[in-house]
Image (tube, helix red, strand yellow):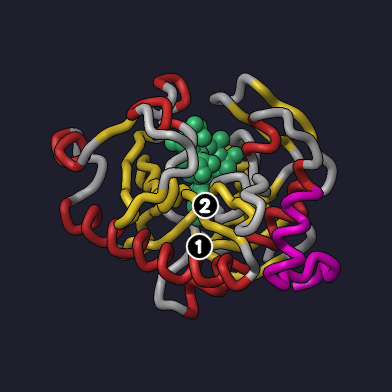
């Protein structure tokens, strides 16, 4: 597998072309950003931890029947993935109220949401990722109705699997964001699942073990990610595929 030109560099990852037109390399950097990139810091080991964490979770989701872009780990910071035509929508599932939902609806943080709720956001930093609904998606042609149904189905299927995995590690899956793309006509889970894109609380103490530690300057950000990885049984030591 040959690494070719850089295709895109986002806030946390860089995507490279390969000699296979259907595959790209995702490089997980140590850059950590919040508030639409206004706050950016380098956190040692973050790229490595998120790369391996993501590999572990994508494996679990694939086992549960969620098609993902993940192929294999290439190194500490790189994974080989299917090249997707990304759908510019963030699918957020919430099991417990936190973050922007609390601000928008005045709900106290920690309120259980039963059943879990789902929200769509447009992936657009300049517009601060505004919340959108299915009518917007249809009118602006961001995705077809069939694709929206599939994204909803896969996002909730992921919730069932992941809530269980985290709970077995005494962790509450509060909320998370998924991004999908198209691969030869099929809707496939892309991007990453790591503590950067979800909220995870210790089940007993409700201690935050995710990116809110960075957003809220709580300290020990990567130590918390590593703690989650350890509890889940993610192997952070081996660097080879
Ligand atoms: P952002 O663009 O939000 O700053 P990142 O730094 O994580 O995010 O950059 C990764 C970029 O790569 C994102 O825009 C994401 O949509 C895109 N991406 C994720 N998975 C794939 C894939 N399999 N194929 C092509 N692009 C992808
Ligand atoms: N999220 C994300 N990327 C975004 C926006 C949100 O990964 O651009 C994740 C975030 O980490 C949380 C969930 O989606 O797990 C819901 O985020 P929320 O809408 O509460 O936004 P926030 O206030 O955290 O930006």
Q: Name the mark on residue 82.
A: 1
Label ID, residue 122 = none
Which is nearer the eye, 59 or 182? Answer: 59
| Tag 1–tag 2 contact (CB < 8 Å) | no
Residue 17 belongs to magenta span: no
Please tell me which of labels 1 and 2 falls first in the chain. Answer: 1
Residue drawn at (63%, 37%) of the image: 212
**What's drawn in magenta, residue-wise?**
223-241
Residue 95 in the image, given as x and y percentages of width and height? 41, 53
Q: Nearer the viewer, mark 1 or mark 2?
A: 2
> Of residues 11 and 217, which is closer to you in this image?
217
What element does badge 1 sit on? strand
Give percent across and percent down for residue 58. Answer: 55, 67
Image position of 212 (left or right of 82)? right
Callout 1: CB less than 8 Å from ligand 1: yes
Q: Which quarter of the rendered picture does the N terminus lie within?
A: bottom right
Residue 154 drawn at (x, y percent): 34, 64
Question: Outermost residue, front direction?
Answer: 204
Height in image: 103 above or below 227?
above
Q: Mark 2 sits on what residue?
A: 191
- Classify 233 as above or below 213: below
- Residue occupying the point 61% across, 53% down: 194
**Residue 7, percent across and down?**
57, 42
> With respect to residue 90, does 184 lie above or below?
below
The residues tagged by marks 1 and 2 sit, at their Cα atoms, a distance apart of: 10 Å
Image side of residue 20 versus residue 28, left or right = left
């Amino acid at each position: 597998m040959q690494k070719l030109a850089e295709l895109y560099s986002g806030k946390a990852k860089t995507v490279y072309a390969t000699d296979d037109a259907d595959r790209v390399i995702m490089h997980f950097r140590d850059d950590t950003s919040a508030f639409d990139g206004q706050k950016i810091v380098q956190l040692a080991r973050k790229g490595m931890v998120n790369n391996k964490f993501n590999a572990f979770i994508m494996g679990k989701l694939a086992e549960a029947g969620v098609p993902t872009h993940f192929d294999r780990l290439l190194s500490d910071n790189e994974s080989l993935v299917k090249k997707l035509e990304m759908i510019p929508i963030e699918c957020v599932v919430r099991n417990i109220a936190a973050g922007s939902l609390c601000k928008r609806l005045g709900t106290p943080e920690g309120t259980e949401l039963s059943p879990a709720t789902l929200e769509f956001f447009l992936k657009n930093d300049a517009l601060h990722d505004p919340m959108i609904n299915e009518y917007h998606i249809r009118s602006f042609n961001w995705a077809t109705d069939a694709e929206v149904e599939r994204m909803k189905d896969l996002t909730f299927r992921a919730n069932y699997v992941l809530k269980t995995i985290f709970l077995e590690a005494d962790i509450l899956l509060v909320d998370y964001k998924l991004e999908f793309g198209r691969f030869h006509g099929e809707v496939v889970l892309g991007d990453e699942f790591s503590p950067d894109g979800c909220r995870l609380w210790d089940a007993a103490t409700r201690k935050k073990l995710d990116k809110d530690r960075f957003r809220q300057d709580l300290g020990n950000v990567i130590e918390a990610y590593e703690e989650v990885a350890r509890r889940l049984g993610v192997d952070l030591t081996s660097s080879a595929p």
